[in-house]
Image (cartoon, grey):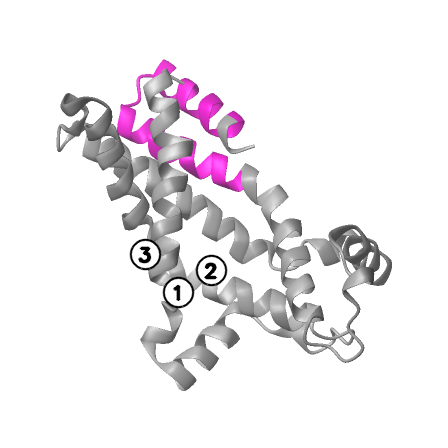
Amino acid sequence: MFVAGSTATKRMILANGGSSTLAALCGGCVGGIAQALIMTPAGVIFTTLNVNQGREGYNRNNNNALLVTKAIWKERGIRGLYTGIGPMVIRQSTNWASRAGLTELARTQFHLSNYGVWGEIGSGIIGGVGSCWNTPVETVRLRMQRDVVATTDTTTTNKRSARFYIDQILERDGVAGLFRGVTPRAIQAIWQTTFMVVVPNLLGV
């Protein structure tokens, strides 16, 4: 989903006279949004599987992705699988716009592309680490999906906005709470950027 959306957008921008950096930014943004169509249900299912392990009467034999998907669909319909779609779209679009845009800046403005494959990988590392500025969006998305799947009564949780979670985290843990897990996320971003941005660049996609 990401490669299809990103590649088509980059080609369109370049064909209309846009710069490589603009093409990378727009391509990353559109690719990230396309990716969110798959990532949101996957995130809900993943979160549900983890939340279920803490419930009374948990039976791992009756707890898998397929059964969870069926249960969510039965209880909440397709909208249940897209709980947290807003934060996910923001996260994915800003993630990949930052990764692709910063990688391209490193390649062209810092001239890392002159150093061959290692320079390209270095640009991907810069893009990956730099993209972690939006970690608070991911923190909110996780809290939102966790609370919804943790209860069958969604009357209250459905009314909780992103602002509610931001205020809650700031009150309890301060600004640092919004960036919890940023280190492993940066490591993940590096290999994802290398695989999804640097490799396509090397292949001329």
The residue wearing badge 3 is 133
Report crowding for label 3: few under 14, some 14 to 19, many 20 or more residues within 10 A (C-alpha).
some
Report crowding for label 1: few under 14, some 14 to 19, many 20 or more residues within 10 A (C-alpha).
few
Q: For the residues marked 3 and 2, what is the alpha-carbon distance in whole angstroms?
A: 10 Å
Which label is found at residue 138?
A: 2
Q: Is residue 28 magenta?
A: yes
Evaluate whether residue 158 shows in this view: no
Which label is found at residue 181?
A: 1
Q: For the residues marked 2 and 1, what is the alpha-carbon distance in whole angstroms?
A: 10 Å
Tell me which numbered mark, 1 or 3, is placed earlier along the sequence.
3
The residue sitting at 44% across, 78% down in the picture is 169
Q: Along the horizontal axis of the image, is 52 left or right of 121?
A: right
Report crowding for label 2: few under 14, some 14 to 19, many 20 or more residues within 10 A (C-alpha).
many
Callout 2, which amino acid? Answer: Glu
- Say which element carries label 1: loop
Q: Along the horizontal axis of the image, is 90 left or right of 150?
A: left
Q: Is residue 144 magenta?
A: no
Q: Nearer the viewer, mark 1 or mark 3?
A: 1
The residue sitting at 63% across, 62% down in the picture is 47
Which label is found at residue 169?
A: none
Residue 134 against residue 121 in the figure, above or below:
below
Tag 3 and tag 2, C-beta contact below 8 Å: no
Tell me which numbered mark, 2 or 1, is placed earlier along the sequence.
2
Q: Range of the magenta residues?
A: 4-33
Assign the N terminus to one quadrant of the image.
Answer: top right
Give the farthest residue toward the front.
Answer: 61
Tell me which numbered mark, 3 or 2, is placed earlier along the sequence.
3
Please state the horizontal and vertical placement of residue 66, each as a whole percent of the image: 79, 50
Please state the horizontal and vertical placement of residue 197, each as a whole percent of the image: 37, 31
Q: For the residues marked 1 and 3, what is the alpha-carbon distance in whole angstroms?
A: 12 Å
Please state the horizontal and vertical placement of residue 44, each as a whole percent of the image: 65, 58
